[in-house]
Structure formats: C-alpha cells, structure tokens
Amino acid sequence: MARKKNLVFETQSRSDRGNARKFWIILTVSVLAVLLVSVALILKNNDYDINAAFGFEKETETTEEPDEVQTDVFEAERYFLLFCTDSDKQKINFMSLVRTELPECRVTVCAVDPYSVLETTESGSETAASVFVKSGERALVSSIERAYGIDIDRYVGTDETDFKTFINYFGGMKITVPEQIDYKTSEMSLVLIKGNQNLKGDTMFKYMCYLNSLGSEGKRRQSAAMLEILGGVFSQGNLNRRSRIFSQITNNMMTDMSIVDFSQEENGIVLLMQNGILQPETVDYPEEIG
C-alpha cells in the first residue's frame, strides 16, 4: 500500500514540547494580567485619572480663547456657606463662610469650626454639625445666621465623593503648602512637600481634613486653601464652560441655587471670571466676615 505523504505521527516528545509551550504562554499571560491590575490599582490609589488616560469621560480641550463677554457694571455683595460632609452625611468635615463683592472682585473667606457651639438650648449645646445631622442644611444655614448675625444668600454643600469629583473636574487645584507634611493616623495618611502643589481630589480632601488638626492656625490655612480653590474655579480659563460648572454644582451638590439664580447672577460670574479674584482676603472669626 502506498504511503501517504505529509503524514505526521505525534510522538511523546513532540506532545511534551507542545504542552510546555502552552504552559509558558498561559503563565506569561497570567503574569502580565496581574501586573496590569497591580499598576492600575497603584495609579488609582495615587489619585491618577485612569478614565482620562484611556479617553473616557474626558472633556474635549480646545485652544480657543475665552469669549469676550461684555458686561455692565455689576454691583453686588453676596454671602455663601460652603461645607463638605462625609459620605453618610453624619459629619461635617470642613466648612467656610464666603463673601463676594463686585465690581471690586473681592472675595473674603472664613473657615468655621463645625463643632463650635452655635447656640445653647434646653436640651444642651448645638453645634453646626449637630444641627445639620438632626435637621439638614436649611436648619444649618438658619443657625449660623442667628449665631453670627449675617444673612446667607446661598449655600453649597457636598459629600466627600462629590467634592473629590468636582476638584478632579478641573484637573486638580493649585494650592500653596506652607510646610512639609508627613501625617498619619488610623483614618488617613498625607505626605506633601512644601511649596506650590497641584492637588487632585483625594489629596485635596485629605489636606483640608488634616488642617482641622492644627487648631486656629489650621483654620487660617483652610481659609487660604478655600480662597485658592475659588480662584481656580473663577478664572478666565473657565469662562467658556461656566454653565457646565454651574450644572456640576446644581446636579451633584446640596444647594438652594437654581437655574434662575445662574441667569440673574451670570454677569457677576462673568466679571469675576474675567478678572479673577483681585482682592483675596481671609478673616479669623465668622463675626468679622460681615
């Protein structure tokens, strides 16, 4: 019988080599997968925007110059309460009173201790934090107004997650760190070098919370940091996306602002963004902000 051409018999040696090759391919792929997952986790833990790196949820950047928006002389004085809670809204992490004055483009900030006593009732002392936990943000505003003799026009509150998301929306915020920080507790760790830093959301949140541990000096630094955050928001580079910024606030945060407020105040917002904060100021006590 004629022998068939190209007939290959599987030998034990050939089979062993094939199995060995499959084993090394599988092992190599597994190691690469583990390495990729490890790198991703490391980047995420260090506040690296993985979605942006791969093109997801990234706002399109253009080289367009900001629109030239003509505004009439806009005279206004407004008071705002800004605060950040934990994810369960059972704790206020930090809080600030802000006064804006136009057309001077003057912004004054006072960091307020959420656990200082606002008033004493029959049931005991009430702090800003306890009022918020029991009765919500509107009661918090009313209590602060009574305690410090000011009228708050609008409030904006956010929880920990949305605060970080908002900061990351701008690619981080430029903050001046006055001294090197190496801080570790059971709840968090924070390491920063002295000087100008661009802090992403997670690091910014930790920095603001860390300042709570420094007493009165920490409150002064908190006021300065909030001024720098506001300066990063109300800058000429953000003029063309002011409506999107407003949507971020109204859609994701606790606030009594509405689209009507934005329309009425837009000229003032434009003026502040065009000029930036020309007169940044901080005060140590809430009574001084009025």
Image (tube, rainbow, N blue to C red):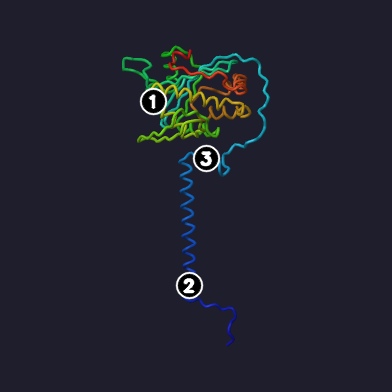
Front residue of 151 and 189: 189
Residues tagged 1 and 3 counted as in contact (Cβ below 8 A): no
Locate the N terminus by quadrant.
bottom right
Label 3 sits on residue: 49
Q: CA distance from mark 2 to mark 1?
A: 70 Å
Q: CA distance from mark 1 to mark 3?
A: 30 Å
Label 1 near label 2: C-beta < 8 Å?
Answer: no
The Cα atoms of the two marked residues, 3 and 2, are separated by: 47 Å
**Residue at 55 percent of width and 32 percent of height:** 170
Instruction: Give the residue number, with chain letter if any, for mark 2.
Output: 15
Q: Where residue 41 appears, x then y in whole percent?
A: 46, 45
> Which sits earlier in the primary sequence, circle 2 or circle 1?
2
| Residue at 40 percent of width and 36 percent of height | 189
Q: Amino acid at mark 1?
A: Leu
Q: Earlier in the sequence, mark 1 or mark 3?
A: 3
Position of residue 279 in the picture relative to residue 35 (left or right): right
Q: Mark 3 near mark 2, Cβ–Cβ under 8 Å?
A: no
Q: Position of residue 55 (x, y in %)?
A: 58, 43
Q: Nearer the viewer, residue 226 or 159?
A: 226
Amino acid type of the residue tagged 2 in the rendering: Ser
At label 1, counting other C-alpha atoms closer than 10 Å, the crowd grade (few under 14, some 14-19, many 20 or more) is few
Q: Which residue is mark 1?
A: 214
Neighbourhood count class around disc 2 (C-alpha, 10 Å): few under 14, some 14–19, many 20 upward: few
Secondary element type, mark 1: helix
- Which of pointers 3 and 2 indicates the residue nearer the eye? 3
Task: Mark 3 or mark 2: name the one nearer the start of the chain.
Answer: 2
Query: Picture quarter containing residue 243?
Result: top right
Callout in the foreground (2, 1): 1
